[in-house]
Image (cartoon, rainbow, N blue to C red):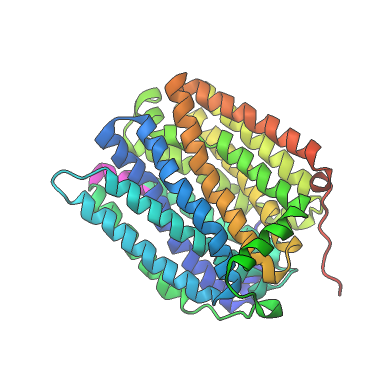
Amino acid sequence: MVDVTPLRRVPGYRWLFSGMFFAQAGRQMTVVAVPVQIFQLTGSTLAVGMLGLAQLFPVLLVSVVGGALADALNRRMLIIISQLVLAATAAGLLWNSLAAEPLVWPLFVLVAINAGVSAIDNPARHALVPGLVGRDLLPASLALNQTMTNVAHAGFPAIAGLLIATVGLPVTYGTEVVMFLISAILMRRVPDVATEGGGRGFGFSSIAEGFRYLKDQRVIQATLLIDLNAMVFGMPTALFPAMGTGVFGGNAFTVGLLYAAPGVGALIGALTSGWVSSVVRYGRATIIAVMGWGLAIAIFGLTDSLPLALVMLGFAGAADVVSAIFRGSIIQLTAPDELRGRMGGMHTAVVAGGPRLGDLEAGVVAELTSIRFSVVSGGLACIIGAWLIARWAPQFLHYRYEPAAQ
């Protein structure tokens, strides 16, 4: 089972963990509510895919800057401010949903702002964890983060779908506002952790320094690329509204189940992740996990059975959480503390931007061919991409974890 030692030993990490849970819960409700509302207003799968494009540019533009801010400013304060802004965007979504005729464009604008703020919040959170828990507890902490994230992924998309189907979008968006405000309150209890080496002043030279460091780090490059590969080709979430109501003949609750299924599988994978502490070949484990993700997505695209589809999405989620634990560990253990914010910003650009590209890719391919072809071809491309990255970066394939010297 998952190792809870960081929660037992580190009070500051407990507060961070709790605050992250409420933030993730609010985000997962947004992930379902906004696409469902856009599909209700437009009836277009392509429009839902364009939602990913609206989030992509803010993520790419802000994430690198956000990483530099996380290395220059107080990381805890950046996290708190981010939660307050996320609460404000959720309030905007609530206001629009209460209109007699809700508009489409505010959904794109507010979600774009949400994505940009998350690109500041995520690097700050990632950079804060190693200083709170230390090197030896880092893999266990990342496994716990994945557990917490996937509790939110497993439950709150389904809750959002149920709320939309029963009491409507305004209540769903209002719940999100409360979630982000609670997160901000909890984050105030997280202690400040000084950046090793005194940090780096914010500016263009700081951003450039991050890119110069990344240029010589083939292992980190491969870590980012293999996640981008999986998210672009093997993340067909833009098709879930059409699949839930069309392919599987359901309603908004069915759509919520599709969004929740990867989270359920990831939660099971995270809860049973105690074995990761015995793994030392992080690169090989990541490649196997990503290939497993792609295979599950391909099977999901072939089936007409909702139960089998949910099982395959769950298997994909379990594979993804294993990949995420090892990928996060590789980046955090490789980069020095004074550069962790900037590496975290680049990681955020991939983690948050990849699914947005995946939404666009899935929507465009489905529009040009069919929903089924879009999903299956993406899963197979994910497998091929992982194999090519392993060939391109043997250092990544053979990466081994080395415990801290006693």
Q: Can you say which quadrant of the picture contains the C terminus?
A: bottom right
Answer left or right for 8 relative to 218: left
x and y percentages locating residue 210 in the rendered image: 67, 62
Task: Residue 173: name its quadrant.
Answer: bottom left
Residue that lies at the very extreme toward the front in this rendered image = 204
Which percent across, then down, holds residue 267? Answer: 55, 50
Give the percent coordinates (x, y) of residue 121: 50, 64
Residue 298 is a magenta residue: no
Please report the bounds of the magenta region as a residue range: 159-166
Q: Give the camera-side residue of 374 and 312.
A: 374
Relative placement, left or right, of 391 versus 115 is right
Q: Is 165 inside the magenta-drawn segment?
A: yes
Q: Is residue 381 above or below residue 126?
A: above
Residue in the picture at 84% in, 61% down: 402
**Viewer-proximal residue, 276 or 343?**
343
Q: Position of residue 142 (x, y in %)?
A: 64, 60
Q: Is residue 385 above or below residue 214?
A: above
The residue sitting at the right extreme is 406
Work out whether 101 lies above or below 362. below
Q: Residue at 45% x, 24% y: name it.
A: 366
State the count of labels. 0
Q: Is residue 129 left or right of residue 309?
A: right
Residue closer to the observer: 340 or 152: 340
Name the residue located 79 percent from the left edge and 47 percent from the top edge: 396
The secondary structure that most of the magenta stretch takes on is helix
Q: Quadrant of residue 331?
A: bottom right
Q: Is residue 303 visible?
A: no
Query: Does the rendering let one see residue 293?
Result: yes
